[in-house]
Amino acid sequence: MHSDAQWDAWADTLAEEDYVLIDGYLPPELLAQLMVFFHAKQDELTPAKVGTLNARQQAPDIRSDMTYWLDQDRDQSLKEVFAWIEESLLRWNRLLFLSLSGYEFHLAYYPKGGHYAKHLDQFRGRNNRLISCVLYLNPDWKPGDGGELQLYDSTGTHERLHISPIMNRMIFFRSDAVWHAVLPTSAPRKSLTGWLLYRPSDVGAIIGA
């Protein structure tokens, strides 16, 4: 979907900065499929939880989004999206000498006022998330709508960058190193969010985490 030169440049940025931001990531036809799917699943979104498999609970003071976990066998209409995910995994493996072998993704919806407090994407005792991925799906986002992704430095104490959640903007970042938060929204905010894994997940779409 993108040239070798583009992937090479993105890999250099990810290696040097721990994140890479890409606008216009998906082709229009694939983006349209994803938007139709998101709309169809709006009523199946459930409140997100925090914690690992045996200790998951709702914590609206920490995060207040709603999610729908993707399943490759069930969600056949997204087969081209899964093909994109797999291409991304293979590219990062080759360019960054990783050992990625699985992934987990969900739709994420933040209602007005939604937020996600500062955190890392790796759980204690579960370190197989290597690269986090967020593709924004907000065609009408404008300054003042909130919901920006706030990146912090490696200590998690100093603000580093605000990322506006505009349509078809993708960010890849290191799950173990990049502290981040979703700032409060003043308009609904949608994304496809996931992780490329060192080994296949046992808590993702299959069990509806």
Image (spheres, helix red, strand yellow):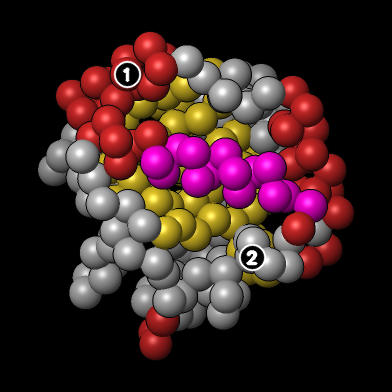
User: Would you say the magenta stretch is mainly helix, strand or loop?
Assistant: helix
Residue 104, image x, y percentages: 49, 59
- The magenta segment is 77-90
* Residue positioned 27% across, 31% down in the render: 95
Q: Amino acid at mark 1?
A: Asp
Q: Is residue 79 magenta?
A: yes
Q: Residue furthest left?
A: 155
Q: Is residue 27 above or below residue 81?
A: above
Residue 29 is drawn in which quadrant? top right
To which residue does mark 2 refer? 71
What kind of element bears circle 2? loop
Residue 41, image x, y percentages: 80, 58
User: Where the N terminus falls, by quadrant?
Assistant: top right
Residue 185, image x, y percentages: 60, 40
Q: Nearer the viewer, residue 61 or 84?
A: 84
Residue 201 is drawn in which quadrant? bottom left
Kindly report the distance in space between the C-alpha atoms of the residues bearing marks 1 and 2. 30 Å
Residue 80, image x, y percentages: 68, 42
Given contact means CB atoms under 8 Å apart, are the residues at marks 1 and 2 in contact?
A: no
Q: Is residue 99 magenta?
A: no
Q: Is residue 115 visible?
A: no
Q: Amino acid at mark 2?
A: Asp
Q: Is residue 35 visible?
A: yes
What kind of element bears circle 1? helix
**Mark number displayed over residue 8:** 1
Q: Is residue 97 left or right of residue 136?
A: left
Rate crowding at label 2 as few (under 14), some (14 to 19) or many (20 or more) other CA atoms within 10 Å. Answer: some
